[in-house]
Amino acid sequence: MDKPVNEELVTFEVVDDIALVGLNRPDKRNAVSDRVIDALAVCISRAEREAKAAVLFGEGKHFCAGLDLAEHAERSAIEGVRHSRGWHQVFSRIEFGMIPWISALHGAVVGGGLELAASTHIRVADSSAFMALPEGQRGIFVGGGGSVRIARLIGVARMMDLMLTGRSLSAEEAEGCNLAQYVVPEGAAKAKAVELAKAAASNAELSNYAIIQALPRIQDMAREDGLFVESFVASFTQNGPEAKARLQAFLDKRAGKVRNPNDLGQDGGSQ
Ligand code: 1HE
């Protein structure tokens, strides 16, 4: 039995198989305290149980101002390690969990907020979003998996620049370096994220699981190891009854075709 969600800190609801998880501490710009991490962990468990995909967003004017600096000032070295490892555990449950997670980003997406966004599978930024890693200015270091996830997304050179200078990237710049896959008008990120979550939720669950679990692992492998693992994942995924039914549906012309983005107004979508 899951613990009840602390809705004061993170809101949770499921609409049409999509879990909507909202960081809900707008007066502190959704800064991530220990209690926020605990509430997020409960939401992740519920989302995996109750939904086919999840959307993570922030209430108020910002997605997330990162680590709660008021709490962090008090930590000893060993408490700092425990704290960072705790974030790793929770964020890994997003990245390497059962369902796709889409983040809807607006306003500040900074420090630990960017690390959290980097653990989701697709990031949608609205035009108000800005991304930064101000850890150097605060006299600390990334501790929520950023050196692994953000560096893989944008490359070490760019992460080095962000951390040494503390500069902010606009939403467009973030899209240009893989921190966002979509940029939408201000206020439209959550709706776009829900649309993408619904598309992902309509896939076979086993395909989604294979995509989420295999792609980042294969990226970390040597080429030949990656190709070898790919063959096994491919074979395992296509052997289930759902894959057979979906392939047959296409052959019977009952499934949607892949959409040509140049065909304006035509609904030839793959659903
Ligand atoms: C906070 C935090 C926070 C705001 N911890 N309380 N993160 C940062 O270094 C980012 C620090 N925050 C900011 O730069 C700005 O607050 C924002 C650009 C995000 C938003 O600006 P603004 O003008 O909308 O809000 P504000 O007036 O600065 O802040 C409103 C309140 O939120 C204020 O508290 P109040 O009691 O005076 O009203 C702020 O103190 C509070 N607040 N951000 C605690 N982060 C696992 S390692 C991860 C390492 C990191 O994440 S380092 C990056 C930390």
Image (tube, grey):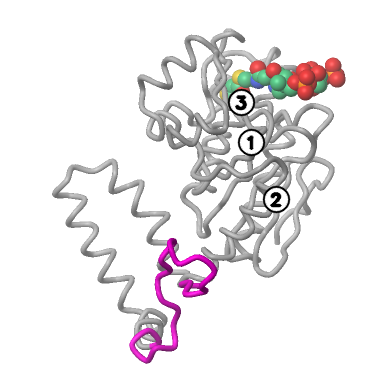
Residue in view at x 48 percent, y 29 percent = 146
* Magenta highlight on residue 259: yes
Which secondary structure, mark 3?
strand
Residue indicated by mark 3? 110
Question: Which sits earlier in the primary sequence, circle 1 or circle 3?
Answer: 3
Which quadrant of the structure image shows residue 110?
A: top right
Q: Specify the segment rendered in magenta.
A: 249-271
Which secondary structure, mark 2?
strand
Which secondary structure, mark 1?
loop
Residue indicated by mark 1? 127
Disc number lying in front (3 or 2): 3
Q: Quadrant of ligand 1?
A: top right
Disc number lying in front (1 or 3): 1
Q: Amino acid at mark 3?
A: Val
Question: Which sits earlier in the primary sequence, circle 2 or circle 1?
Answer: 2
Residue indicated by mark 2? 21
Is 164 left, or right, of 62 in this rendering? left
Q: Amino acid at mark 2?
A: Val
Residue in view at x 62 percent, y 13 percent = 76
Mark 2 residue crowding within 10 angstroms, few (<14) / some (14–19) / many (20+): many
Observer able to see residue 83: no
Name the image quarter holding the N terminus. bottom right
Give the image location of residue 13, x and y in percent.
Answer: 75, 59
Residue farthest to the left, as pictured: 224
Which quadrant of the structure image shows residue 39?
A: top right
Main secondary structure of the magenta stretch: loop
Q: Ligand 1 within 8 A of label 3's CB?
A: yes
Question: Which sits earlier in the primary sequence, circle 3 or circle 2?
Answer: 2
Residue in view at x 52 percent, y 22 percent = 142
